Amino acid sequence: MSEFLHALINYQFLQIALLAGILASIGCGVIGPYVVVKRITFIAGGIAHSVLGGMGVALFYGFDPLSGALVSAVLAAILIGWVRLNWRTGEDILIGALWAIGMAVGILFISRIPGYQADLISYLFGNILLVPPQELWFMAALDATLLLVVGLWHRQILAVVFDEEQALLRGLPVTFFYLLLLVLIALTVVLLIHVVGLILVLALLTLPAAIASQYVHSLIRMMLIASLLSITLTTLGLAMSYQPNLPPGPSIVLLTGLAYVLSSLFSRRRRSA
Amino acid sequence: MKEVIRIRDLSFGFGDLSVLEHIDLAVQEREFLGIVGPNAGGKSTLLKLILGLLEPARGGIEVLGKRPAAARHQIGYVPQYPGFARDFPITVRQVVELGLLGRRADRGLLGCLLPMRPNGEGRARVERALREVEIESLAARQIGCLSGGQLQRVLLARALVADPRILLLDEPTSNVDQRAENEIFDLLKTLNERMTILVVSHDIAFVSSYVNRVACINRTLLCHPTAEIDGDLIHELYGEHVSMVAHRH
């Protein structure tokens, strides 16, 4: 750990990695509780995996891959949400199709670019150590957007997440707020790509919020605790992977998974005591 | 008496399956109407049509002189099954507050996009609704910690908080014990002094002692004053022998 702290003081790439972890943690801490209480992890997974298609196309045509990720994540979110609201029976098939087709498109496009394998692995499993400094601004802007939207419309989103039928009967535009929630999830997925990669996104999006739900019983408190927990776990994962030179993304996810298992055991014991 | 709901020659089905046929019904202001009938007879479907959640295949519905979707904000609805998970992290007070959203939505789409923190008037309404259904002491509790009867009262408070002119309840006492059932219907009787109530129930004998009129639905509809309910009528409605069990509450 002391070696990590020493390196943190001396190396800019580690400072950037730490900052990227904190920025990603704020996003997943704020949006993760909605995913957990609405039980839409599978939808979030569909959005996350379809992102590779957009990244591949953007890379192939010389655009910034994160812009491609952003566009494809938002499009996937709107498509899944629309089908879920209007065509309920086909929802799971569509998510599965977007999941697979998005990845296939991404891999095909990336395979046509020389040196693609390194890029592919870092998009799939993340590499927080390779975050370019200018992307911190992009991540901060995504965080600001998430916080602003949640700050403005938390009650409306809560109404839709809690009971869609009643929200509709009270006159709320349920389609708008449901699609907005999925778009927020899409933004969070993009935020997390550098940290844990799109395959492991689900872990950071759901597990810190799930741990928080074992101890607090309000969405706002869940958001606060999930954000702090996520910051702690990404920082610890980064530190623990540094010395043995392990990939940080999977290390962060393993640590988060371990925290979830231990917390679940502790929480179950606490309830039965 | 003013008419608040008018249904004309309404038919509805799910695909080829006909659920309601040629329904005609007029509900007057401050009427307490019991909707009874066998399972799958179309009782809940009729409520959803009145709420505008389903569109009739034929015929029409007017609620307060408007189409159902336009009158929704003046209707309180208590569903048979809550549309939320019981472990959702939310308190009783927050659930009731969510029932206030319609007051802003009433101002159109822009009203729905404005931040919605309950103001002083809103908070007073929430307290009044909690008091009316006698759950003030539960206000800070999580919904997952409530009994079936307590949860029904929370759903009722959520429906009442926006001051509806019409209250629709779908089997409000299906998951509660007999004492709670009596208490809830006594409360509905009081609420009926200021609003029209339509309640779906499977217990024809029990609701008959509270409502003014019974609408018997088994795909088609027959309305009767409660005094007319007898064994022959029930036999005709259900199409088979049904025992009448006298309730002594």
Image (tube, coloured by chain):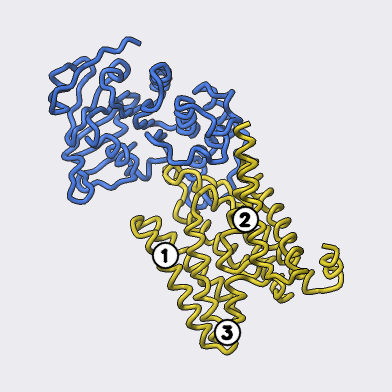
Chain colours: A yellow, B blue
Given this view, does label 2 or label 3 mark the residue nearer the observer? 2
Q: What quarter of the picture does the C terminus of chain B occupy?
A: top left
Which residue position holds label 3?
Answer: A116
Q: Position of residue A262 (x, y in %)?
A: 65, 47
Q: Is residue A47 visible?
A: yes
Q: Position of residue A61 (x, y in %)?
A: 54, 86
Vertical arrangement, residue B154 with respect to residue B105, above or below: above
Which residue position holds label 2?
Answer: A257
In whole angstroms, how far apart are the C-alphas of marks 2 and 3?
30 Å
Q: Is residue A269 left or right of residue B77?
A: right
Q: Which quadrant of the figure has residue B76?
A: top left
Tell which of A103 and B178 is nearer to you. A103
Q: Position of residue B77 (x, y in %)?
A: 40, 35
Vertical arrangement, residue A213 with respect to residue A255, above or below: above
Indicate the amino acid at tag 1.
Gly
Q: Which quadrant of the figure has residue A87?
A: bottom left
Q: Residues within 10 Å of mark 2 (few under 14, many from 20)?
A: some
Give the residue at x 44% y 70%.
A100
